[in-house]
Image: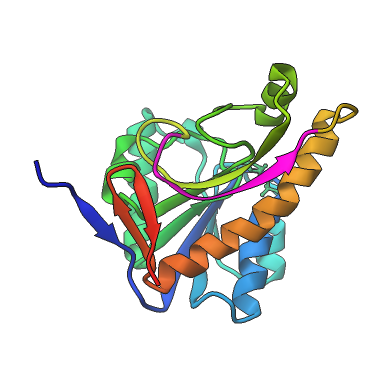
Amino acid sequence: MSQEIFRSPKKRGRIAVFLSGRGSNFRAIHDAILAGKINAEIVLVFSNRPEAPGLAIARERGLETFVLNPKLYPTKEEYDREILKELLKREVDLVCLAGYMRILTPVLCQAYRYRIMNIHPALLPSFPGLNAQRQALEWGVKYSGATVHFVSEEVDMGPIILQAVVPVFQDDTEDSLAERILKEEHRIYPEAVRLFFEGKLEVRGRRVYIID
Ligand code: GRF
C-alpha cells in the first residue's frame, strides 16, 4: 500500500489562531512573526469565548478577531462548518490551536488535514487531554515537556512535529512545572510554524521529517 506524503508549502503563509484563554502561545507566534522569523501573517484570531484574554491581546495588536458562541449551534459539526467558512473566506493556510479548549470535529480536521497544529504541555503520547502537568506529577515521571503536533480526529494523537524536554523536580507543583514547560512551548511552537512555511515539514505516516 502506498503511503500518503504531505509536504508543507514554501510561501508567505496566512495563519488563523484559535484560543480560549490567556493566549501566551499566540503572543509567542506573533512576536516571532514581528521579529521576521516566520514568513507569515496572522489573518484571524478566533475564539469560542468572548472574554478570552488572548482576544484582547489580538485587538491591541491590531489583528482581526472573531468569536462564535457554540451554544447557538445545534451540533459541534455545524459550529465547525461555520468556522471553516471563515477560514476559507480568508484563504487560511495554517490553523494554530493555542489553548483552544474545544475538540475539533472531522469537519475541520479533514478540510485542514496537516494544516492544523496544536501545542500540548506534555511529551505525547504520555498524558493527553486535560491537566497534563498534574498527570505528569501524579505519575511520578522525572521528565516531561511540550509537544507540537498536527491535529487529527483523535485528540492529542496526530503526527509529532517538535518536542522539548524539561526535568520534573521533587518539589515541583503543578504551577512550577507548567511554567518550566511553558517556556519551551514558546520556543518550539513558533519554530514549528517557521519550518512549516519554509516548506520543510514532510509527513510520512506518523512521522514528520524536517527536510533541509
Ligand atoms: C498551554 O499550556 C498549551 O500547551 C495548552 O494550553 C495552554 C495554553 O496557554 N494547550 P496559552 O493560552 O497559550 O497561554
Residue in the picture at 29% in, 40% down: 107
Does 59 appear above or below 148?
A: below
Does 197 lie within the magenta span?
no
Does 127 appear above or below 26?
A: above
Residue in the picture at 34% in, 44% down: 108
Is 8 displayed left or right of 143 in the figure?
left
In the foreground, 183 or 96 = 183
Is residue 61 visible in the rendered structure shown here?
yes
Residue in the picture at 34% in, 51% down: 84
Residue most extreme to the left: 1
Does 97 appear above or below 178?
A: below
Question: What is the magenta range?
Answer: 157-168
Quadrant assignment for ligand 1: top right
Rendered-image quadrant of the N terminus: top left
In the foreground, 108 or 155 = 155
Does 159 lie within the magenta span?
yes
In the foreground, 196 or 23 = 196
Q: Quadrant of residue 180?
A: top right
Rendered-image quadrant of the C terminus: bottom left
Percent coordinates x, y for residue 169 in the rendering: 84, 32
Does 44 appear above or below 142?
A: below
Percent coordinates x, y for residue 158 in the rendering: 40, 40
